[in-house]
């Protein structure tokens, strides 16, 4: 069984099978440097630290895909939901 080392300092078991890593085309070995568990934890922490960035990304994705539903008013509603106003 092939293994890989997780780069996260919080990872309990550093050596894991390659099935525990997501794909990443930009890497030489084709796998993400963090295991799925650590990647999920890092993403949750990032979303809690920067909640407004999720709103911006969602609005940009909708506008690029042609699913824009109300411009600035939708932005304000989503931003207030995420921030909690």
Image (cartoon, rainbow, N blue to C red):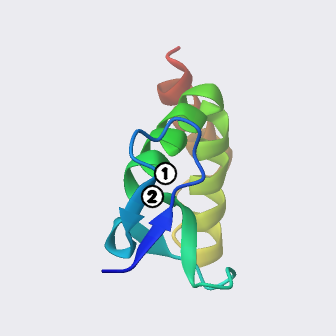
Camera sees residue 4: yes
Measured as percent of width and height from the top left, residue 21 is found at: 43, 68
Q: Residue at x 61, y 85 (%)?
A: 25
Query: On the picture, is 7 further left or further right than 14?
Result: right
Residue highlighted by disc 1: 39
Q: Dot 2: within a 10 Å radius of its alpha carbon, few (fewer than 14), some, or many (20 or more) residues?
A: many
Query: On the picture, is 1 further left or further right than 59?
Result: left
Camera sees residue 66: no
Q: Which mark is residue 65?
A: none
**Badge 1 vs badge 2, beta-carbon distance below 8 Å:** yes
Measured as percent of width and height from the top left, residue 3 is found at: 41, 72
Residue highlighted by disc 2: 35
Q: Residue at x 65, y 35 (%)?
A: 52
Question: In which quadrant of the rendered image does the N terminus lie?
Answer: bottom left
Query: Judging from the image, what secondary structure is the residue with disc 2 in?
Result: strand
Residue in front for this viewpoint, 50 or 45: 45
Residue in front for this viewpoint, 80 or 8: 8
């Amino acid at each position: 069984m092939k293994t890989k080392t997780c780069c996260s300092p919080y990872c309990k078991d550093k050596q894991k099978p390659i099935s525990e890593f997501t794909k990443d085309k930009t890497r030489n070995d084709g796998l993400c440097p963090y295991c799925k568990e650590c990647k999920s934890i890092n993403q949750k922490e990032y979303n809690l630290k920067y909640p407004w960035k999720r709103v911006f990304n969602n609005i940009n994705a909708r506008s690029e895909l042609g699913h824009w539903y109300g411009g600035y008013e939708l932005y304000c509603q989503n931003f207030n939901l995420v921030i909690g106003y």
